[in-house]
Amino acid sequence: MRDGTDLQVDERFINADGLVILEYMTFRVRIQHAHAFAGYPLDPQRQRQRVNVEAGEYDARLTLREFEPVVGAENCLQLVDADARGGDLSVKLREFDELMSFPVDVNPLHIEVLSSRLTRPDEF
C-alpha cells in the first residue's frame, strides 16, 4: 500500500465484525423505471402523500423515520432529491419486500446499486 492511501474511519461507524454500519453508508442507486417504488416527502405539509419515484439515479441511505407516533420509527430507504417537487423521499421498507434486504439482495429489474461510500458528516 502506498503512503497516504489508507482509509481512516471513525470507530463509531464500525460494528462488532469490523464492518461499516449500513446506516452510515450512502449508496448510489438507479431506479430502473417509474412507479417501481413510492415514498413519502420530508416536507411536513405533504408527509402523508405517497409519491411515485421516477426512474433515475439517486443517492440512497437506510434511515429511520417516524410517520405515526403510535407506531414509532420505521425503517426507510431515503432517496435524496427524488421528490419532483423538491426534497427527499422516504420509501418504507415494509411496503416493498424486495427492499428488505437492501443493499445486499435487490431486484435488478427495479433497482440497481451502482456504488457505495461513507456518508459525509454534513449529509446527516
Image (cartoon, grey):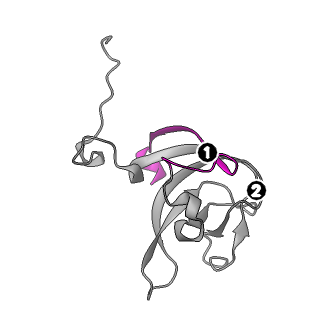
- Does the magenta run of residues contain 44? no
Residue at left 44%, top 89%? 70
* Real-space Cα separation, disc 1 to disc 2, in angstroms: 12 Å
Return the residue nearer the eye: 87 or 40.
Answer: 40
- The image shows residue 113 at horizontal and vertical percentages of 58, 42
Residue at left 65%, top 45%? 108
- The image shows residue 44 at horizontal and vertical percentages of 60, 77
- The quadrant of the rendering that contains the N terminus is top left
The residue under label 2 is which amino acid type?
Glu
Side (left or right) of 61 relative to 58: left
What is the span of residues highlighted in magenta in the rendered image?
Answer: 103-124
Residue at left 50%, top 84%? 68
Please name the residue that numbered disc 1 is placed on: 29
Name which of mark 1 and mark 2 comes first in the sequence.
Answer: 1
- The image shows residue 23 at horizontal and vertical percentages of 40, 54
Please name the residue that numbered disc 2 is placed on: 54
The residue under label 1 is which amino acid type?
Val
**Which of the 4 image quarters holds residue 119?**
top left
Seen in the picture, residue 1 relative to 101 is either above or below; the reply is above
Asked whether the residues under the numbered discs 1 and 2 touch, taking CB atoms below 8 Å apart as contact, a structural biologist would say no
Residue at left 68%, top 56%? 82
Structural crowding at the residue carrying mark 1, measured as other residues with C-alpha within 10 Å and reported as few (<14), some (14–19) or many (≥20): many
Helix or strand or loop: what does disc 2 sit on? loop
Seen in the picture, residue 75 relative to 102 is either above or below; the reply is below
Residue that protrudes farthest toward the bottom in the picture: 70
- The image shows residue 16 at horizontal and vertical percentages of 21, 48
Structural crowding at the residue carrying mark 2, measured as other residues with C-alpha within 10 Å and reported as few (<14), some (14–19) or many (≥20): some
